[in-house]
Image: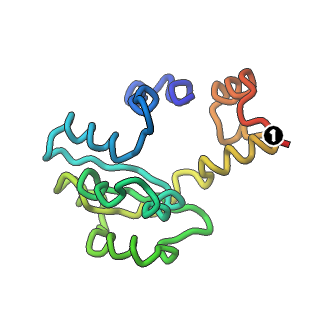
Amino acid sequence: MVELAIAGHPELGCDRRELLRSGKSYSVLTLRELREEHGPDMPLAWLIGIDSFLGLPTWHHWQDLFTLCHFIVVPRPGLDMDATDSVLSAACQGRWQTAPEALAEGPSGRMYLLPMALRPESATAVRDGLQTGRNMNTVLASSVSDYIRRHGLYTSKV
């Protein structure tokens, strides 16, 4: 579906490593592989919604992520950094940058809060909408909507 969504945008690519990995796939494994491929000095930034970011302390080896990449945190309506628990808050201490250019000054460990949401919808909200039968054509590429409909994905569990 990612490939369908980015078709016609040659500057974008789809990395299949997590689909092809045997066993459990963790973000930290993917970022370790990317770090190896790009070297220790190349800045790597991970765009992540605040809803996912706030859950980092539950992730596998989550603290290692700060040594592997920068974080660009995307706000979502109704969520803000005030919801950060004390463990995550401590891990973020001193990492926040006021300008995105600061991320280019080092390979990892910095954080930037995007000043506005790229899209208000989260992937979870889109999946929930599809599952409950809502029309999500305004937030999905038509090729992706067609694929979902053709393959009966995200249908209601009721």
47 left or right of 79 in image: left
Location of residue 105 by image quarter: bottom left
Crowdedness near tag 1: few (<14), some (14–19) or many (≥20) residues, C-alpha within 10 Å = few
Asked which colour scheme the image uses, the reply is: rainbow
Q: Amino acid at mark 1?
A: Ser
In this view, 73 is above or below 153: below
Q: Residue at x 33, y 42 (%)?
A: 29
110 left or right of 123 in image: left
- Residue 13 appears in the figure: no
Location of residue 89 by image quarter: bottom left
Q: Residue at x 79, y 40 (%)?
A: 135
Figure quadrant of the N terminus: top right
Of the pair 14 and 30, the residue shown nearer to us: 30
Q: Residue at x 72, y 47 (%)?
A: 128
- Residue 158 appears in the figure: yes
Q: Residue at x 39, y 45 (%)?
A: 27
87 left or right of 102 in image: right
In this view, 144 is above or below 41: above
* Residue found at the very far front of the displayed protein: 23
x and y, in percent, of residue 126 in the image: 67, 45
Location of residue 158 by image quarter: top right
31 left or right of 137 in image: left
In this view, 118 is above or below 86: above
Q: How many marks?
A: 1
In this view, 144 is above or below 131: above
x and y, in percent, of residue 17 in the image: 38, 30
x and y, in percent, of residue 111 in the image: 32, 63
Of the pair 44 and 87, the residue shown nearer to us: 87
| Residue topped by disc 1 | 156
Of the pair 51 and 72, the residue shown nearer to us: 51
Q: Which element is circle 1 on?
A: loop
